[in-house]
Amino acid sequence: MRLPRFVYFLPAIIALGWFGWWVWGTPAEKQMLAAQAEFLTALEDRDWDEVKGLLATTYTDAMGHTRETAVEDAQQILSQFISITLQTQNLHFQTQKDQGQTAIQIRMDGQGLGFGPMVMARVNAMQEPWQFHWHKEGLWPWTWRILRIHHPELHPIQLP
């Protein structure tokens, strides 16, 4: 007995349907939160290419960072740690079309050298949540990028 021809294409049709649902059916909130988890994991792993890739090319913050200087400073600060774990709690998130915001509490745990313990103590003492401003740059779920990271307790250092 010979099977109809469409049966041979059935697995491809199912795979394409699943892929389409994943790309266009996944809610924006879930996409954005997945990107945020990816960003925090990249920081823990100190995967600087991944960190930079998740920051928008137009990234700026109140500290005066651009995308490049933010990565350079994070690299310098986190190089003081032998190991680091970021424990996070999402307090609030919202999306509207291709924009989103998250507010998360971050606690650091790890072994630091030099000024690492001071950084960890400072981050863990912060009471206010970190604010992440996100933008989806394309059609695909993996094109969410951080436009800005803000924390009300951080201020630029004023040199005399």
Image (cartoon, rainbow, N blue to C red):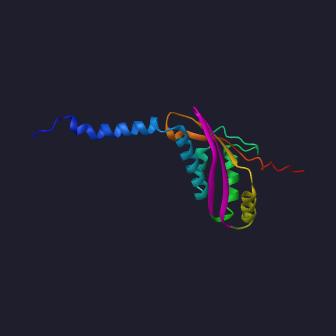
Determine the residue located farthest toward the front in the rendered image.
91
x and y percent of residue 160 in the render? 90, 50
Nearer to the camera, 92 or 160: 92
Nearer to the camera, 101 or 35: 101
x and y percent of residue 120 in the render? 71, 61
x and y percent of residue 39 in the render? 59, 49
Nearer to the camera, 24 or 12: 24
x and y percent of residue 134 in the render? 62, 39
Q: Quadrant of the N terminus?
A: top left
Q: Is residue 97 magenta?
A: yes
Q: Is residue 27 left or right of residue 134?
A: left
Nearer to the camera, 28 or 46: 28
- Residue shown at the point (53%, 42%) measured from the top left: 30
Determine the residue located farthest toward the left in the rendered image.
1
Which SS does the magenta portion mostly show? strand
Look at the image and give the residue range highlighted in magenta.
Answer: 84-111
Location of residue 4 (image quadrant): top left
- Residue shown at the point (53%, 34%) measured from the top left: 138
Determine the residue located farthest toward the top in the rendered image.
97
Total labels drawn: 0
Q: Is residue 140 magenta?
A: no
- Residue shown at the point (63%, 58%) measured from the top left: 86
- Residue shown at the point (60%, 58%) measured from the top left: 44
